[in-house]
Image: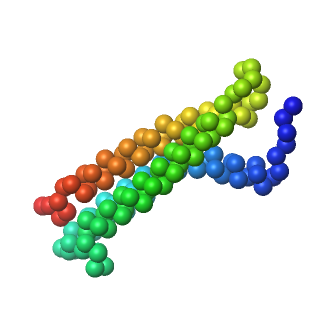
């Protein structure tokens, strides 16, 4: 027999599970918009800095902050995967099985998103800014 959770715990668990699945993709979107936009807009204006901050440091922050978000989503998805492992016979507890599947999807999606962020960061940080 399964035990009913309080509504607040159910809500928090659902939000964390959605973060575990979508956190990396959202972080990658933030990275794509921020890092490349900062680089392109600063270079189009003919500047090598953004509000007094060197362009390389601004782009580095636009890579590091989303990478931390994707790594956090990866950690939450791994924790969800560990906590929702099926212990009983197949189909015994369908909500837990669905959560386990979502955790597996989150693991792969967050790993892919983190890899894309890191490789995109390498590209923006290694290539000289404002190269024409």
In depth, the one of 113 and 71 nearer the eye is 71
Residue 81 placement (x, y as % from top left): 61, 36
The quarter of the picture where the C terminus appears is bottom left
Q: How many marks?
A: 0
The quarter of the picture where the N terminus appears is top right
Position of residue 9 relative to residue 39, above or below, is above
Residue at (62% x, 36% y) in the render = 82
In depth, the one of 51 and 29 nearer the eye is 51
Question: Within the image, what quadrant is residue 66 found in?
Answer: bottom left
Residue 41 placement (x, y as % from top left): 27, 68
Residue 64 placement (x, y as % from top left): 38, 58
Q: Which residue in the rendered view is the most extreme toward the top?
A: 89
Q: Which residue in the rendered view is the most extreme toward the bottom?
A: 52
Q: How is the image coloured?
A: rainbow
Q: Is 25 placed left or right of 31 in the picture? A: right
Q: Is 114 placed left or right of 120 in the picture? A: right
Position of residue 89 relative to residue 116, above or below, is above
Residue at (76% x, 29% y) in the render = 93
Residue at (36% x, 58% y) in the render = 63
The answer, for residue 59, to whether it is visible in the render is: yes
Q: Which residue in the rendered view is the most extreme toward the left?
A: 132
The answer, for residue 102, to whether it is visible in the render is: no
Residue at (78% x, 55% y) in the render = 8
Question: Within the image, what quadrant is residue 125 found in?
Answer: bottom left
């Amino acid at each position: 027999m399964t035990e009913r959770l309080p509504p607040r715990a159910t809500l928090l668990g659902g939000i964390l599970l959605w973060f575990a699945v979508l956190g990396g993709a959202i972080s990658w979107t933030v990275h794509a918009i921020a890092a490349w936009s900062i680089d392109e807009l600063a270079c189009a204006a003919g500047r090598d800095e953004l509000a007094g901050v060197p362009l390389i440091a601004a782009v580095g922050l636009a890579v590091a902050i989303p990478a931390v978000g994707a790594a956090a989503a990866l950690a939450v998805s791994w924790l969800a995967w560990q906590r929702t492992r099926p212990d009983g016979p197949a189909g015994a507890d369908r909500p837990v099985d669905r959560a386990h599947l979502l955790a597996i999807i989150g693991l792969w999606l967050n790993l892919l998103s983190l890899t894309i962020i890191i490789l995109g960061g390498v590209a923006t940080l290694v290539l000289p800014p404002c190269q024409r």
